[in-house]
Amino acid sequence: MDQAVASQRELLTLDELTARVGMSVRNVRFYTSKGLVPPPIRRGRSGYYNADHVARLELVRELQSHGFTLAAIERYVAQIPTNASPEDVALHRAMLAPWQADTAVELSRAELEQRAGRSLTDDDLATLAALGIVLRTKRGRWEVAVSQLSVGLGLLDLGFPTEAAIAAADVYAAHGRAIAEELYELFRTMVWPAYKESGASPEKLQEVVERLKPLSVASLVSAYEAAMDETKREGIAQRAR
């Protein structure tokens, strides 16, 4: 059956849509007015919604959970083609979800210092932020990767330079973006088509991505270690000449 035809048959009322995505009517209408989701499908005087509306609203909700502002959400959604299938949109959402199980804990500065067992200077916080261990929120609090906090504190004790942490963060960001873009393209052009042919749903794709994430992280670490070993060998060989 043609995908567009199938999508049209699964029409939802506004109430059914809000129940499906966990949003209020007001929010759905607001996001529609902003162009983040297409307008409802008209059948006489009534408006209906389909899988495309569901996928795009779930993407908006995922972006909000990552702290995206409305303007940032609008820019992100604007990059997605208007004719993108619900599966393509679902892939965007699946790739946005955290790739590591460690969930950040939001703490005040006093709570963070209590958890650290010490006072933290602004330079200390800047180093921890550059290391990706803490992130300042708009409310003046801190999102903390608790499992990594002791590692960061140990580096502070060893006098790890803030400038080096910031420079390393720039390296991670530059190469991380390239990896993210290439992985997304791989999932879009190779993984999803294989499941699509078998009639799998966007939810199945999301489950596949979630199961692959820890393996992908482990593969990146292994590739990094192999590259570091090779770099060290090349450095030793050059010094021996």
Image (cartoon, rainbow, N blue to C red):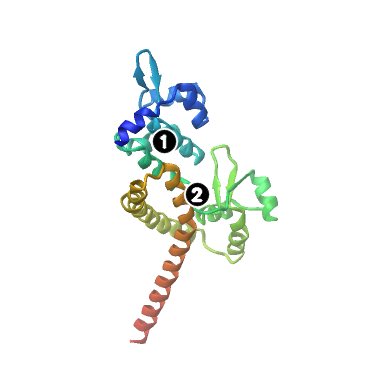
Image coordinates for residue 178, horizontal then vertical, percent = 35, 55
Q: Give the CA separation, mark 1 to mark 2.
A: 18 Å
Q: In this view, which residue lies farthest toward the bottom?
A: 241
The tag earlier along the polypeptide, 1 or 2, is 1
Quarter of the image with the N terminus in it: top left
SS assignment at label 2? loop
In the foreground, 145 or 183 = 183
In the foreground, 6 or 173 = 6
SS assignment at label 1? helix
Q: In this view, which residue lies farthest toward the top?
A: 45
Q: Tell me which amino acid carries mark 1.
A: Ala
Q: Compared with residue 51, is residue 237 higher up or lower down, i.e. above or below?
A: below
Q: Tell me which amino acid carries mark 2.
A: Pro
The answer to whether marks 1 and 2 mark residues whose Cβ atoms lie closer than 8 Å is no
Quarter of the image with the C terminus in it: bottom left
Q: Residue at label 1?
A: 55
Judged left or right of residue 17, residue 150 is right
Specify few, some or many for label 2: CA neighbours under 10 Å numbering under 14, 14-19, or 20 or more: few
Residue name at image x 59 percent, y 45 percent: 142
Residue name at image x 52 percent, y 30 percent: 22
Q: Residue at label 2?
A: 98
Question: How many numbered marks are there?
Answer: 2
Q: In which quarter of the image is residue 155?
A: bottom right
Residue name at image x 67 percent, y 55 percent: 116
Q: Compared with residue 82, is residue 207 higher up or lower down, i.e. above or below?
A: below
